[in-house]
Structure formats: C-alpha cells, structure tokens
Image: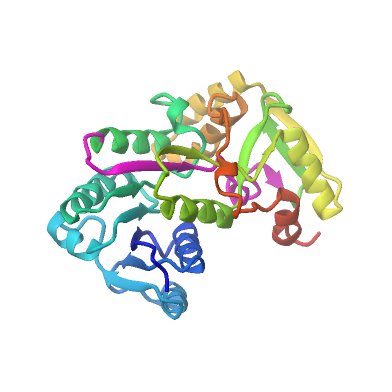
Amino acid sequence: MTTASKTFVVGATGLLGSQIVSALLDRGAPVRALVRPGTEGDKRAALAALEARGLELVEGDITDPPEKLAAAIGDATTVISAVQGGPELIVDGQVNLVRAAERTGARRFIPSDFAIDITKLEDGDNFMIDWRRQAAAAYGDTSLDVISVLNGAFYEVMIGFMGIVDWEAGTVSHWGDADQPLDMTSVPDTAAFTAAVALDPQAKGTQRFAGEVLSMRRFHRTLEQATGRSLALKKLGTADELRAEITRRAGLTQNPFEYVGLQYQWCMVTGKAKFDSLDNDKYPQVKPRSLEDFVREAAPEA
C-alpha cells in the first residue's frame, strides 16, 4: 500500500501526459486524470488500460469554471499539466488550473514546460515558449510551489517534427556550429523524471534533465551507428542566417507554427537555451535511454 499523496494530471491523453500517468502508476502512486467528456477511440482505449492499473478518471476541461475544476482536483496535493495547444490552453487554461488548485488546498504545481531552458530566453525567441513564460508570470503570485521540469528537446522531435533528419534523402541538416552541445531526452524518460519530481517532497524550483548532451556532429554519428546507414551531414547556414530565415518566413505567413521548428533550432544551436547544469543525479532510479538505443527502434527501415 503506497503512502504517496494523490497526483492530478491534465493532458493525460497526450503522448507525454499518458507516459507521466504510467510512470506515476509504476511507482505505486495514486493518480487522478482529467479527461474531456466524449473522449473516444484510441484515446479512450489507452485510458482504459491505465484505469486497469489504478488510474482514477474524472470528466472535465481545463477551461471549466474554477469551482468545477477544483471539484475535479479534489484531494490531490500535486497538480501536473501536460497540456499542449494555443494560448487559450497554455496561458488561460493553466492559470485557471492554478486558481482551481489553490481552492482545493493543493500544495504543488508542475506546468507544461517540458522544453529547453525557458528561463534563459527572451520574448520573441520562440512564440510557444513565450506562452509558457506568460503563464508563469500570470500565476506568479500563487501560493502553490511551482516546479518546472525541463528536458531539452525530445528525441522524438529531433528525428521527426523538427525536419532535421530526412531518412529518404539520407541527410541530417543543421544550422550553426555543428559542435554546439544540445540537451535531449526521450518522452518516456521525461515522464519518468517528472514522476520522480512529483513524488519528491523536497523538489522545488526548476529541474533540468537530459538523456544525452550531444552536438549535431555527434547526433549525426549516433544516427549512423544506430541504423548502419550512411547519412550526409548538411549545414544550412549560420545561426544568424537561421534568424534571418525565421524573420523571412514570419513575413510570408500568418501561421507561426510553420516556422516554430526553426525557432526551437535557433534557441538550441546558439547555445542560448543550453542547460548550465543537470539534476539527473537527484533521481538515480531514472536511467535515461541513450539516443542510439532509441533510434535503433524508432528509425524507419532503410
């Protein structure tokens, strides 16, 4: 029988949120998750599997009135947000969640930060991180202990969404200095570190974790080693040229999501969002997976 206090998770149907719930359940912690009414299909099936392991579900929405959201939080002492979306969720929704948590007597809040070092960036560097900074400023007067978990870039994003790796063309493209160190972590390991932080009564402030710290040159070599494939390392330009390309694209579209991947790359390749130190040693029970092992399973067949 666990003595851990209950954790409330919002965003449990997402890739990271579901992994956080799983990691908490693995450690025997009681977990309650908020799900939108009418959640069906694969997401409902995944939730059912977690329910079978002890997850408690409650229907609602992060945008519900604070009194209704507070009833959903109930007796949970730690609230974790793993929501993704626009400012209506990241800013307004998370502020609403914090105010609801204050009503219940919850003690701690872990926001949906999960990124490179947002504390070192400035407005305009990355619009999605700007939203997280705006949310933090808006609930900055909270009585809750706010614990931010940062993981660098997800392995899954580095070989997917970011557009760095083109398996079909056999290229790994980069901007800036190929030897600039970069922080990276898999989604499951980020979830495991988050669960460890949530269950650690001594955890405070910003916690920084990385599965690997690799330059683009080493990233490229690791992909080759993991797949046995020859991949060309292709430099697209300097960091300043990348900034100019972001500005150019911003002038061509009203949809910033079309260039946000480049904004993340700029924050990384300049070293501006590089972690100064890591907190991995605080949680030796979490043994993060290497990028090489991850790629061996995740990379498409040649």
Picture quadrant where residue 4 is located: bottom left
List x then y, in percent, for residue 5: 34, 61
User: What residue is rendered at 37% in x and 50% in y?
Assistant: 85
Residue 251 seen: no
**Was residue 154 drawn as part of the magenta stretch in this picture?**
yes
Residue 126 seen: yes
Q: Return the residue found at the far top.
A: 240
Q: In which quarter of the image is the N terminus?
A: bottom left
User: What residue is rendered at 53% in x and 56% in y?
Assistant: 192
List x then y, in percent, for residue 260: 49, 38
Task: Tally the marks.
Answer: 0
- Compared across the picture, whether 214 is left or right of 3 comes to right
- Compared across the picture, whether 69 is left or right of 208 comes to left
* 195 lies above or below 206: below
List x then y, in percent, for residue 138: 24, 35
Between 69 and 198, the residue placed more toward the observer is: 198
Picture quadrant where residue 188 is located: bottom right
Magenta residue span: 140-166
**Was residue 120 drawn as part of the magenta stretch in this picture?**
no
List x then y, in percent, for residue 59: 26, 70
Q: In which quarter of the image is the C terminus?
A: bottom right
User: What residue is rendered at 29% in x and 56% in y?
Assistant: 77
- Compared across the picture, whether 213 is left or right of 92 comes to right
How is this picture coloured?
rainbow
